[in-house]
Image (cartoon, grey):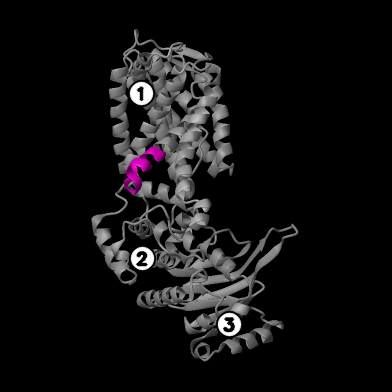
Amino acid sequence: MFNLIPVFCSNDIMSLVRALPGSTAQGLIWGIMAIGVFLTFKILDFADLTVDGTFGTGGAVTVMLILAGYPPVVAVGIAFLAGMLAGIVTGILHTVFGIPAILSGILSQIALYSVNLNIAQGRANQAVSVDLYHLVVSGRNNPLTIITVAFVILVMIALLYWFFGTETGFTIRATGCNENMSRAQGINTSVAKVVALAFSNGIVGFAGGMLAQYQGNFDVNMGRGAIVIGLASVIIGEVIGEALFGKRLNFSARLAFVAIGSIIYYIVIQFVLWLGLPTINMKMFSAMVVAIFLAVPYMRGRAKNSYRKAAKN
Amino acid sequence: MLEIKNIHKTFNLGTINEKKALNGVTLYLDEGDFVTVIGGNGAGKSTTLNAVAGVWPIDSGSIIIDGVDVTGLPEHKRAPYLGRVFQDPMNGTAATMEIQENLALAARRGQRRGLRWGITKAEKARYHEVLKSLDLGLEDRMSSKVGLLSGGQRQAVTLLMATLKKPKLLLLDEHTAALDPKTAAKVLELSDKIIAENNLTAMMVTHNMRDAIIHGNRLIMMNEGQIILDIKGDEKKKLSVEDLLQKFEEVSGEEFANDKALLG
């Protein structure tokens, strides 16, 4: 994941600025994945750990199909379908076999590690060079990547806005909110969950396909930590979105802010790297950054409305 | 309209918590019957309603709604025949969705849901009128999220959702138990009105003996998973709370020590 970010040893502000397009581009691609995570985490109220595996599945499927001669656009489309299958498996583990939600995701994720290796014909790393293939996005051309991915995200948000306004979209929202009431209204909550998991993982698979093209290879570990990045993006986006728009933040805006959250996450990582701190501590700094983002609104609320203040008045 | 034939249900069979909740319950309701169900805690009142709703499968016996044997159907497949209001006001609606969206969900109970639009303009107009009849000011807040409403308002909306599409059977499970007396009275009044207007068949579980006598045309009393009393029509109208307590003692041979019932 960090193989494209050069290690900084000087604190030259221009080097940070020069790295911004790369961070923005990567942030946007991971933003697609974060939107997938938003669907299950926020709407279905299901912490779906499958995504660490699905992301790699999308990458593997895309790279192997491109190497086999398929157009990259078709390859990411099929990556979407592969992602959907992964989501359906998790859904079935949970609804048919009664395995608790988080465990279902973990089991799928573990199985997908092997599946992904199989797809990549046993290779833990498969390169797909932009010199040889007409890839949709590439790290060699950040501005074009940014424009392409931003456009894709806008189309996605429009589609999701439409979908969650349909009858089926309603059933998913109701299931995520109140399962008992949903069943009392005739909704098959098991089917609703599987559908949501399918679409969410489809999106994550698609994002994996895009990242594989961007970085020019599939790596069996490319999805590791994806759920954390996804959740961090969702939460950062929510914090900033609500800070800026408060109650007026509607569904489409929320999705847009998830993508923005992802970009911010990546820029902050970039900033931390630029500070020249030892890269072995990257994960700790990332965790600290997310913790601060989560803590700030809570602490501000507490400051306005605290027991100490009540005692003084 | 409803035939409950000798149903049995035991929970936690074989463990120390084993409880025979339903011990041969048989009940026949005609169309338009409004039955109130009373009994002590653990008598099997809510359990009977849950059995009819299909929350879990029964051990033996059968449940037939308007001629259709639903015994083998899961909860969501029985939903088209039923309207339900739960005891917990938070449980009957989706808090993160708007009032009109909740109503739209209820209106599609029993239909195949596809990719059609979740709520149409014509529907919104209809819901505005329907909400107006509640007389709670909700028609002006149709796009507010249900989570912002009070318990009584949510129960009113749940009641509306249960009866928007006329159900074969309306199940009210202590639906005013969590409300203050004034709001409870309002919701009961609404329940009466909707049941009367639509000639619904209804079962209402209540701890309040006075309410059980005043509302409905029929009253059943349960104890230890069985129906021990079934009074209808004029005989029911002449009942008083003391009568019920006495009848309970006669039939079950124990004192009906339920404070809430005594306080009526």
- Does A243 lie within the magenta span? yes
Alpha-carbon span between mark 3 and mark 2:
34 Å
Q: Is residue B67 above or below residue A60?
A: below
Q: Earlier in the sequence, mark 3 or mark 2?
A: 2
Relative placement, left or right, of A118 versus B160 is right
Q: Badge 2, how many Cα within 10 Å: few under 14, some, many 20+?
A: some
Alpha-carbon span between mark 1 and mark 2:
50 Å
Residue at disc 1, secondary structure: helix
**x 32%, y 34%: residue:** A156
Q: Badge 1, how many Cα within 10 Å: few under 14, some, many 20+?
A: many
Q: Which residues are magenta?
A: A238-251
Dividing the picture into quadrants, the one containing residue A13 is: top left
Q: Magenta region's main secondary structure?
A: helix
Foreground pick, A118 / B212: B212
Q: Which residue is mark 1?
A: A24
Residue type pointed to by label 3: Leu
Relative placement, left or right, of A174 versus A52 is left
Residue B226, position as x, y percentages in the image: 64, 74
Q: Badge 3, how many Cα within 10 Å: few under 14, some, many 20+?
A: few
Q: Is residue A121 above or below residue A32?
A: above
Q: Which mark is residue B121?
A: none
The lab-note entry on whether marks 3 and 2 share a chain reads yes
Residue at disc 2, secondary structure: loop
Q: Which residue is mark 3?
A: B263
- Does residue A220 appear anywhere in the picture? yes
Name of the residue lying farthest toward the front: A312
Q: Which residue is mark 2?
A: B164
Residue B105, position as x, y percentages in the image: 37, 56
Foreground pick, A102 / B169: A102
Residue A304, position as x, y percentages in the image: 44, 49
Which label lies toward us, 1 or 2? Answer: 1
